[in-house]
Amino acid sequence: MTRLNGSALRLTIFVGENDRWHHRPLFTEIVHRAHAAGLAGASVFKGIEGFGASSLIHTTRLLSLSEDLPVAIVIVDTAERVRGFLPQLDELVGEGLVMLDEVEVHRYTGRERQRKEPEA
């Protein structure tokens, strides 16, 4: 299990929910690659409204329903590990925004995995 405490980097990637990587949602590909790279964790958040470099507003409001809402993927780990992951994002993210923020991790704990009792 990755230990994370103190200074860290937060990597936030904004893409569209319809962005794809080889017929798979781009956000899914990023999360799976972050997991394979051994990063501490990744979460995906779906926006309800936003615009980016294209200046097109995407929204969930009924009268202007969008099928390409903004999605944010957030990853926090040590600076070294996050920066080591950036070349993969250069390959994956054609359109979007990739940001780095210095953060301080106060607490990082996971759930205990339950061990399966042997059957008698």
Image (cartoon, rainbow, N blue to C red):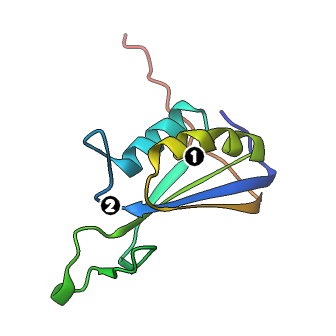
Quarter the C terminus occupies: top left
> Could you say where residue 43 lies in the image, as x and y percent from the top left?
49, 54
Between the residue at mark 2 and the residue at mark 1, the CA separation in whole angstroms equals: 20 Å
Which is nearer the eye, 116 or 85? 85
Asked where in the image residue 52 lies, by quadrant, the reply is: bottom left
Helix, strand or loop at disc 2?
Answer: loop
Q: Residue at x 60, y 33 (%)?
A: 38
* Residue that extends furthest to the left in the rendered view of this protein: 63
Amino acid on which the number 1 mark rests in the picture: Gly
Question: Which is more foreground, mark 2 or mark 1?
Answer: 2
Left/right of residue 22 with respect to residue 74 in the rendered view: left
Numbered-mark total: 2
Residue indicated by mark 1: 41
Residue indicated by mark 2: 17
Q: Residue at x 37, y 13 (%)?
A: 119
Helix, strand or loop at disc 1?
Answer: loop
